[in-house]
Amino acid sequence: MADPQAGRTMVQVLHDTLRAEMLRDPAVVVMGQDVGIKGGVFKVTDGLHAEFGPMRVLDTPISEIVIAGAAIGAAMMGLRPVAEFQFADYMHAAYDQIVNQAATMRWRSVGAWSVPVVFRAPSGGGVHGGVYHSQSIEALYGHIPGLRVVVPATPRDAGGLLRAAIRDDDPVVFFEHKALYRRHREIVADDAEVVPLGVARLDREGGDVSVITYGMGVHLAREAADRCAADGIATEILDLRTLSPFDREAVARTVARTGKVLLVHEANRTMGPAAEIAAFIAEELFTDLDGPILRIGAADCHLPYNGPEETAILPDAARVEEALRRLAAH
Amino acid sequence: MSEPAEPPIPDGLLLRIYRVAVLTRAVDHQLWLLSRQGRAGFVLTARGHEVAQIASAAAMRRGHDSAWCYYRDMGVGIALGVTPYEILLGGLARGADPHSGARQLTMHLSSPSLRIGSISSAIAAHIPHAVGAAYAARVRGEDSVAMCWFGDGAASEGATHEAMNLAGVHRLPVVFLCENNRLAISVPLALQMPVERVSDRASAYAMPGESVDGTDAEAVFTATRAAVERARGGGGPSLLELRVPRITPHSSQDDDAYRSAEQRAAAAAADPLPRLRETLIERGMLAVDEDERMVREAREQVVADEDLALAMPEPLPERARRWLYAGDPPHGGVTLPARYANWTGVFDG
C-alpha cells in the first residue's frame, strides 16, 4: 500500500483515475496490447482486468490499426474507450485511424457522430529506449483539426487531465512521459478534480523571463530556474498541459509580464510545437517583447540506445539555464 | 449429415429487393448524367452490385444492426431507407445533405439513426470500426450485429486483417461481406491476392467463409441471413464473398481503358437486374407492364428529387469550420419530400 502522505506517482494517479472513471461510467473501457492480464508494461492498468473483466479491459493482439479503429467504432456505438498504445513510437501504424477517421468523424458527418476516445501512449526519451521507445510525437497530432493533444507534467495534472479527456466528447491524444511515470510523487487531495483541456497552469511566478513548456520541459525549466534564482533571475514557468488547443490567453499574460520568452520541449526543434507558439507570440504579442523568442528542442535526430549520443540530442537543464541567462541579460 | 431445412424467403421479399434495385439503378443513371453535364463533380455508383447489396442488407434488423459501408454501397443505403433525394443533395454539393453536408464526395453516407457509419474514402478504414461496433454490442449486452461491406481491393489492406483477426479471437458479432468485382480500380484480382476466393481467407480467422453468386438475390439473402443469425446467436463472425460484376468504370474520373471491350461486355451481360426481373416474371410475381411502370416511376421519382435538390442552396462559406469539435449547433437536417414519409427501403411493406 502506498503511503498517502508520501503522495502518488504519475503511474499511480493515472491508474487510480482510470479505475475511478470505469467505476463511475460503465461505458468506459480500456483496450490495448498487454493492458489486461499483465496490467500494462508500465502498470497503468494494473488490476483492472481482474476487477472489470476481460471485455472492459481488452487485451488486443499487436494490431495498432484495430486498437485505434475498434475504439472509434465502439465510441460511435456509445462507449468511451481508452485505447493504449504500448509506446508512442508504435502509434504511427494507427495514424490513419486517428487522423483520417477519429479527427474527421464529427466534421465529415456535420456533427452527427462523436468519437469520444482517448488515445494514450507513453512517449519521451532519456531512458536508453532507443529509436522505438523514445519518441516525442505530439507535433504530428497538434497539426490535425478535430483532435486535442494533452501532455501532463505532474501526477496531479495527469489525473485531472485524463479525467477530462475521458469525459470529453472529442478524440484526445494523451502522451505520458515515461521518465516521469515514477520520478516524482505528489499528494493529490482531490480525487475528482477535472483539469479542463486547453487551460495552462502557472507552475512558478517570476518577473524576468518566461519559460513556456509542457511535459518533461517543465522539470528541466524548474531545475534551470532554481540555478538562475541564486543569481537573482526570477523565472516564470508556464505549463501548457494541453498543446491543442494551447492556452493563448495564458501565453499572452506571461509574455506581457516578462517580455522575454524561452520555449522548451523534448520534441524535435524543427516544426515542433514551439515554432507555432513562437509564431503566435510574434504575430499577436510583438509589442510586449523585450528580446528574441528562444526555442530549445531535441536536435532533429532519432534517439539512440547509447547514453552519450542520447544526451547530446536531448535538451537538458543546463541548456535551458544557459538560454535563461542569455535572455535575462538581454 | 443432413442440414436443417433453410427457412423460406419471406413473401414479397424478392419483389422488394427488385424494387429497391430499380430505384438504385435510377439514381445511378441520373448521377452519371449529372456528371456528364458537369453538375455533379464526382460520381461513384453501384451498377452491378445492387442486388448483392440490397439482398444482404435485407437480412438485417433495420436500425438495430449497424451498417459499415464503402462508397459503392448505394444499394445498402437505399435498402436501409436512405432516399434518392439525400444522395442527390450530396452529389450536387448541397448544404442540406444530412450525411456529410456535401463535405464528402458523392455516396459517402452517414446516419446515426439508421446506424450507418460515416463512409470514408480511405479503403478498409471502416472495417475496424465495424469490429469496434460488434465489441460495443458485446460490452453492452446488446444482440446487435455489425454488418461490414467492402470491395476486393479492401481485402488487401492491413486494417482488414487486423479487424478480422480481432473479431475471430473474440467471436464478435460481425458479418464481413466482400463485394468482389475482381477489380481494384484497374488492378485485377490475380495481382491483388494469391487465392482465388476472398472467402478462402476466412479459415485464418476461424470463421466460416462462403462464396456466393452476388447476382442471385435468393442465394445472397439466404447466406447473409444465416451469417447474421450465427452472429446474433453468439456463433461469431462470418466472411461472405459476393461475386459481382462492375458494369461502369470505377468512377466518373476513370476511363476503364484497362479492360477490353469483351471484358466490359461480359460485365454488362452479368447485370443482376434483368436476371432478377426474369425470375420474378417466371414465378408470376411481376407482370411485364408492372415492371415497365415500376422502372418509369423510379426514373420520374429520381428526376423529381433532382429538381428539388437543384433548387436547394450550396453551403455558406461561414459554415466551413463548424462541427470540428463538440458544441456547435446541430445541422438543420433535411426535409424529405412527402413521398418518403413512410419510406423504409427494402423493409417497406
Image (cartoon, coloured by chain):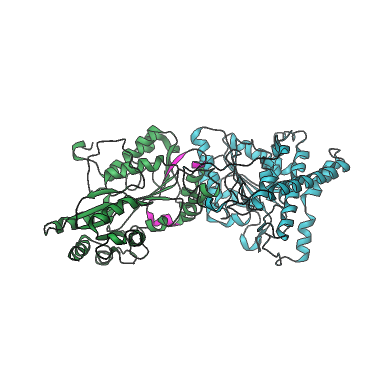
A141 horizontally vs B61: left or right: left
In the picture, the quarter occupied by the C terminus of chain B is top right
Q: Which residues are magenta?
A: A75-92
In the picture, the quarter occupied by the N terminus of chain B is top right
B210 horizontally vs A30: left or right: right
| Membership of B192 in magenta stretch | no
Depth check: A188 or A34 in front? Answer: A188
Instruction: Tell me the colour chain A is drawn in.
Output: green
- Tally of marks: 0
A130 horizontally vs B3: left or right: left
With respect to residue A188, does B43 lie above or below?
A: below
- Figure chain in cyan: B
With respect to residue B22, does A275 lie above or below?
A: below
Residue occupying image coordinates x 70% and y 60%: B38
Quarter assignment of residue A125: bottom left
Q: Position of residue A135 (x, y in %)?
A: 35, 59
Q: Position of residue B85 (x, y in %)?
A: 69, 45
Q: Look at the image and tell me whether residue B246 can be seen.
A: no
Depth check: A100 or B185 in front? Answer: A100
A73 horizontally vs A292: left or right: right
